[in-house]
């Protein structure tokens, strides 16, 4: 074979770090604090709703391409009740195979070869792959540590926009840093998008997982943004059913139609019976979301205390499932080597943040841990990690 089999656009992407580290966890029996999935299921009544849909024959065959009407209506109601955003369930809501497909379909639909896409770095690894598949050029704007957290430099963002910029790919609450962009920061991003006539694709899958009184502000709710924004949501993180892969977008009719044009040639449809269950989940009382948020904030603090006791520098996240740490105080410099050795050293698996940067040196000493686990698992992980301090 004269040419390599892998498309040159994807040549830089191999097996994902999540597959690598999860295999390492399975092979060593280590506690897996790498991949972001809970180790308990979501609400019993929602699981039973999926079983009921299966038994009633709802969704066992192909569901409608845009998603079942019950779920699209529930998504529209959620956006209106939570954020005052009115969307037509028939023309402005599209159900996807999780947020991952929503990101892929949005970028494939909206980015032309040669377009520049600005993304907040460090970024979830599928962002870079999807920009590449669309033929775009990714332009990172790096969130940098400051006063125990990661912050966005708005001047750096403005400087990154060129005549070739097509869209800004946002993620708030932000994985992996846990940053929650403020209303003031998002207002500045919105003003820039309007001024330069840019589209915005915003990944808001952690919208309900914000801590310390932080406010989640959908950028689509800000002046001038509804018609130029594709908002991505997901059931997996909010309801602890990540395996169901139910995601969605909300956008103007024109943007929704564009994304649907790409999505129909990816999975076409998915998650039939689960769509009916998530329609019920989105109508759970406010107490459910408040309890979830409080429980995860407590777990964040539980793991954070354990990591500090083990000698890590800990950046306090205001959202998501994840804590980013720095291993320099442990006398370590290479996060990738550190994470590969950690299962044997301590029986714990984590993710090196260097894989989330275009320039790996930018995150060379940063390691991400997931805290969406049972309390006893987090306590045991902290105990094991304290071996590093000794």
Image (cartoon, rainbow, N blue to C red):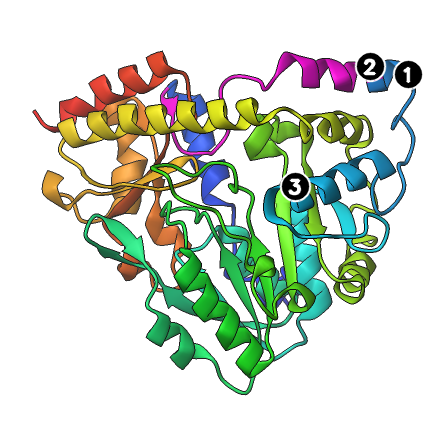
The image shows residue 88 at horizontal and vertical percentages of 81, 52
Q: Which disc is residue 356 wearing? A: none
Q: Is residue 374 left or right of residue 312?
A: right
Q: How many marks?
A: 3
Magenta region: which residues? 30-52
Residue placed under numbered mark 3 in the picture: 81
Determine the CA span between mark 2 and mark 3. 27 Å
Q: Is residue 308 left or right of residue 72?
A: left
Q: Quadrant of residue 261?
A: bottom right
- Indicate which disc, 2 or 3, sits on the residue closer to the N terminus: 2
Q: Residue at x 45, y 23 (%)?
A: 26
Q: Residue at x 68, y 14 (%)?
A: 45
Relative to residue 129, is residue 248 depicted above or below? above
Q: Do the residues labelled 1 and 3 touch (CB within 8 Å)?
A: no
- Indicate which disc, 1 or 3, sits on the residue closer to the N terminus: 1
> Quick one: quadrant of the C terminus?
top left
Residue placed under numbered mark 1 in the picture: 56
Q: Which residue is drawn at 73% across and 26% down?
A: 280
Determine the CA span between mark 1 and mark 3. 30 Å
Query: Which residue in the rendered view is the most extreme toward the bottom?
Result: 163
Neighbourhood count class around disc 1 (C-alpha, 10 Å): few under 14, some 14–19, many 20 upward: few
Q: In which quarter of the image is residue 235?
A: top right
Q: Are marks 1 and 2 in contact (CB under 8 Å)?
A: yes
Query: Which residue is more in the foreground, 122 or 361?
Result: 122
The image shows residue 152 at horizontal and vertical percentages of 34, 62
Residue placed under numbered mark 2 in the picture: 52
Instruction: Give the structural element (helix, strand or loop) at label 2.
Output: helix
Query: Which residue is more in the foreground, 45 or 221?
Result: 221
Determine the CA span between mark 1 and mark 2. 6 Å
């Amino acid at each position: 074979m004269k040419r390599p089999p892998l498309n040159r656009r994807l040549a830089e992407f191999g097996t994902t770090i999540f597959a690598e580290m999860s295999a390492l966890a399975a092979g060593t029996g280590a506690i897996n604090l790498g991949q972001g999935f809970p180790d308990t299921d979501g609400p019993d009544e929602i699981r039973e709703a999926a079983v009921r849909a299966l038994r009633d024959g709802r969704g066992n065959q192909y569901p409608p391409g845009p998603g079942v009407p019950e779920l699209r209506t529930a998504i529209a109601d959620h956006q209106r009740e939570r954020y005052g955003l009115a969307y037509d369930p028939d023309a402005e809501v599209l159900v996807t195979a999780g947020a991952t497909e929503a990101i892929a379909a949005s970028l494939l639909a909206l980015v032309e070869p040669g377009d520049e896409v600005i993304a907040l770095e460090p970024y979830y690894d599928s962002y870079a792959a999807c920009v590449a598949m669309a033929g775009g050029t990714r332009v990172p704007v790096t969130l940098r540590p400051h006063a125990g957290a990661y912050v966005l430099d708005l001047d750096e963002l403005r400087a990154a926009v060129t005549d070739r910029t097509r869209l800004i790919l946002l993620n708030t609450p932000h994985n992996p840093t846990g940053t929650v962009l403020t209303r003031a920061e998002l207002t500045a991003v919105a003003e820039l998008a309007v001024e330069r006539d840019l589209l915005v694709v915003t990944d808001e899958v952690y919208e309900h997982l914000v801590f310390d009184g932080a406010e989640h502000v959908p950028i689509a709710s800000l002046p001038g943004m509804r018609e130029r924004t594709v908002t991505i949501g997901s059931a997996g993180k909010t309801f602890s059913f990540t395996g169901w892969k139910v995601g969605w977008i909300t956008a103007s009719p024109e943007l929704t139609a564009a994304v649907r044009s790409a999505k129909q040639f990816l999975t076409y449809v998915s998650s039939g019976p689960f769509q009916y269950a998530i329609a019920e989940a989105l109508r759970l009382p406010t107490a459910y979301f408040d309890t979830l948020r409080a429980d995860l904030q407590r777990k964040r603090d539980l793991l954070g205390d354990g990591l500090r006791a083990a000698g890590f520098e800990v950046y306090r996240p205001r959202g998501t499932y994840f804590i980013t740490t720095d291993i320099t105080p442990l006398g370590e410099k290479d996060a990738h080597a550190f994470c590969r050795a950690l299962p044997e050293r301590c029986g714990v698996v984590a993710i090196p943040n260097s894989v989330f940067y275009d320039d790996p040196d930018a995150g060379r000493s940063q390691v991400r841990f997931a805290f969406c686990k049972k309390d006893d698992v987090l306590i045991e992980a902290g105990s094991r990690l304290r071996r590093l301090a000794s």
